[in-house]
Image (tube, rainbow, N blue to C red):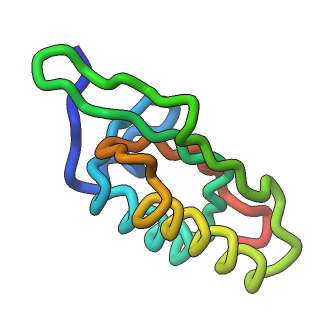
Amino acid sequence: MSQLGDDPEVLFATPRRTVFLTLDAAVRACELATERGNVVYRVEGGIWHPGQGCEMRLDAIWDGEIAPANDQALNSNNARAAIMIATENEGCDTFVLSMKPTTRH
C-alpha cells in the first residue's frame, strides 16, 4: 500500500518510484530540487485517504518547463511549482512531483 511522506528527501532517495508527499514536504522538495539542479516539470495533486491511499485530482495538475534555458528560468519554474502547491492546490493535501536533472548541473 502507498504511504504519505512528510520528508522531501525521500523523493530524491527513491528515483523512478511514485512518492506521495504532504503539502509542506512538496513545497520543500521544490526548493531542494532547485538547490540540486533539478527541474520540477509536473505537479499532481490529490487527497489522501488513510487506509486507502491517494485520490488524484484532474483539476490539480500543473505543468512546468521541461528544459529551462538557464538557472534563472529553473529557479522561476520551481518557484511557480511551489506556489501552485501552496496556494492553488484545489484543496489537495497530497502531491506527486515529476522532476529531472538539468543538463547544466
Where residue 87 sits, quadrant-wise, is: bottom left
Q: Farthest bottom residue?
A: 72
Q: Quarter holding the C terminus?
A: bottom right
Residue in front for this viewpoint, 105 or 43:
43
Q: Quarter holding the N terminus?
A: top left
Position of residue 5 relative to residue 38, above or below, is above
The answer to whether 54 appears left or right of 41 in the picture is left
Position of residue 13 relative to residue 73, above or below, is above
The answer to whether 85 appears left or right of 79 in the picture is left
The answer to whether 32 appears left or right of 36 in the picture is left
| Residue 93 image point, x, y percent | 29, 45
> What count of labels does the image hold?
0
Q: Farthest right residue?
A: 69
Where residue 45 sits, quadrant-wise, is: top left
| Residue 51 image point, x, y percent | 11, 17
Residue shown at 42% from the left, 51% from the top: 12
Residue in front for this viewpoint, 73 or 105:
73
Q: Farthest left residue?
A: 51
Residue in front for this viewpoint, 92 or 36:
92
Where residue 80 sits, quadrant-wise, is: bottom right
Residue shown at 31% from the left, 33% from the top: 47
Residue shown at 74% from the left, 82% from the top: 71
| Residue 55 image point, x, y percent | 36, 23
| Residue 20 image point, x, y percent | 34, 37
